[in-house]
Amino acid sequence: MTNQTKSQFIAVASITSELSAVMVVAKEISLAAANAKAIAFRAGDKAKGFQPITDFINELAKETIELVTNINIYALVLYRLTVDEFQKTTAYNKFELAAKMAGDAVYAKSMQGPVDHARLSMQDCQRQFKRDVSQLLGQLEAVMHHARAARVIAANSRIEASQAGEYLQSLQAVAESVDKAAHTIHDNVQRCRIALSIYRNS
Amino acid sequence: MKTTKIYEGSHQWIMFGRDEGKPSNIVDTNQYVVRTANRCLLLDPGGAELFAPMMAAVLHHAPVDQITDLFASHQDPDVISSLGLWDQALTNAKLHAPAVWEGFLRHYSCESIEYVPIPDNGGTIKLESVELQIIPAHYLHSSGNFHVYDPQAKILMSGDVGAAIEAPDTPVFVDNFAAHVEKMRYWHQRWMPSNQAKRVWIERVRNLDIDILAPQHGRMFKGDDVKRFLDWFDALQVGIAV
Ligand SMILES: [Fe+2]
Ligand SMILES: [Fe+2]
C-alpha cells in the first residue's frame, strides 16, 4: 500500500471517529436544552428571555444530529470508494508489471487492453473521490455554521441568565455546557476538514 | 517462472512453477495451463503475489482474451487469492470451483468472471474439442475439493495430493521415488484429515489411466511413480494432529 493510499484510508476513518464524537456532544446539547427548558419554566417570569433560547438550542442540536447522520452515510461511501480505488490501483500496478515482465512474449501486446482499462477505472475512482470529498466538505461547513450559531446563543443565554435571580447559577451552567459542546463540535469538524482538504477538487 | 510443456497433442499442457521472484516466506506452487487452439484454462492459478509473473508467463502461450477459464481445486489462498486480479484483467472468463466455496471465494472479488459452481459429484470442463473430467477429492484436504483429469493427455491434476515442500529450483519430476517419500510424508499426514476420504479417492483414481500425476506443490509423478505414489498413500495414516 502506498503512503498516499494509507493516508487516504486514515483520513476517511478519522472522519467517522470525529463525527461519532460530534454526535455524542450534539446529544448532550439537546439534553442541556431540555434541562434549561425545565429550569426556565420553574423560573417563570424571571427567565422569560431564556425560554425561546432553549427552543432554539434544541432545534440546533436536532439539526446537527441530522446533518451528522447524513455525513456519516457520505463517509461510508467515501470509505467504499477508497477500498475500490486501492483495488484498482493494485490491479493497474500488477498489470503494468505483468506487461513489463512479459517482455517480448508472443502475446505481450494483448496486455495493453487490460492495462489501459485498469488505468481508466483507477482514474475514475480518484475523480469520484475528489468530487465526493468536495461535497462532504460542504456539509461539514454546515455543521461548523451550526456550532458557531450555538456559541452565539450561549453568549446570549449568559446575559439572560444574569437576570434570573436565584436561577442564575443553573441557567449559567446550561449556557456553559452549550458553549463547551459547540466548541468541541467546532474543533472536531475542523479536524475532519483539515484531514480531507488535501483531497478536495482543485 | 519456469515453464515446462508436459503434454503436446491436439492441445497442450504447460506447467509453471519454481518462480525465482517469489518471496521466500510464501509456499511455492505449480500452476497448470491447458491450451487449445483458441482457449486457455488455468488450473489453480495461484496467489495474488504470483499474478504478474504468472500472467507474463501465460502471455508466451496465449493472448489475454483467450484466457477463458480458471479452475480452483479448493479455496486456499495459494490456489486462488489472485482471483480479484484475474477478475479485473479478463472480460470473458469462467471460474470453475467447488459450489460449497462460492460464498467464500467471492470475498476475493469475482464480478466480471462467471462463477461456475461444481456440484459435489464433479462434472466436466469443455475446452473446444477437449473434455476434461472434474474428479471429486473432498477432504483432500479441503471439504470441497476437486481434481482435473484429462483422458486424452492422461494427466491428473491432483491439487494438494502428491504435494511436497522442496528447496527452490528443484526438478519438476520425481526421479527417485524412495528418496521423495520423506518430503511428502509429513505433508500428507498433517494436511490430509481423513483416511476414509483418502481410500475413496484412491479407489476412484486407480480406475483412471494416468501418465502424469500433477500436484500443486513439489514434483510431478510420471509412469510407474504414479502407481508407487497411490500405493504409498494408500498405506499412509493421515490426520495425525488429533
Ligand atoms: Fe490447500
Ligand atoms: Fe496448496
Image (cartoon, coloured by chain):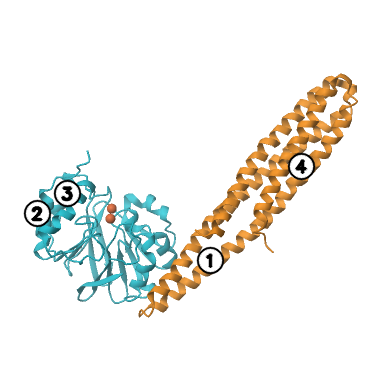
Mark 4 touching mark 3, by CB under 8 A?
no
Q: Could you classify mark 3 by the number of other residues whose Cα lies within 10 Å: few (under 14), some (14-19), or many (20 or more)?
A: many
In the rendered image, which residue does mark 2 sit on? B231
Amino acid type at circle 2 is Asp
Do tags 4 and 1 sit on the same chain?
Answer: yes
In the rendered image, which residue does mark 4 sit on? A147
Above or below: residue A184 compared with residue B214 = above
In the rendered image, which residue does mark 1 sit on? A121
Nearer-the-camera pick, A95 or B166: B166
Residue B138 placed where, x, y %? Answer: 23, 50
Amino acid type at circle 1 is Ser
Amino acid type at circle 3 is Lys
- Please tell me which residue is depicted at 79% across the width and 27% down the height of the picture: A173
Q: CA distance from mark 4 to mark 3?
A: 69 Å
Q: Could you classify mark 1 by the number of other residues whose Cα lies within 10 Å: few (under 14), some (14-19), or many (20 or more)?
A: some
* Element class at badge 4: helix
- Please tell me which residue is depicted at 79% across the width and 43% down the height of the picture: A148
Amino acid type at circle 4 is Ala
Mark 1 or 2, which is nearer the eye?
2
Residue B164 placed where, x, y %? Answer: 21, 57
Q: Chain of mark 4?
A: A
- Please tell me which residue is depicted at 57% across the width and 55% down the height of the picture: A7
Is residue A42 left or right of A132 when viewed as pictured? right
Q: Chain of mark 3?
A: B
Mark 1 touching mark 2, by CB under 8 A?
no
Q: First in sequence, mark 3 or 2: give its number.
A: 3
Q: CA distance from mark 4 to mark 1?
A: 39 Å
Nearer-the-camera pick, B134 or B183: B183
Nearer-the-camera pick, B99 or A160: A160
In the rendered image, which residue does mark 3 sit on? B198
* Element class at badge 2: helix
Chain B display color: cyan
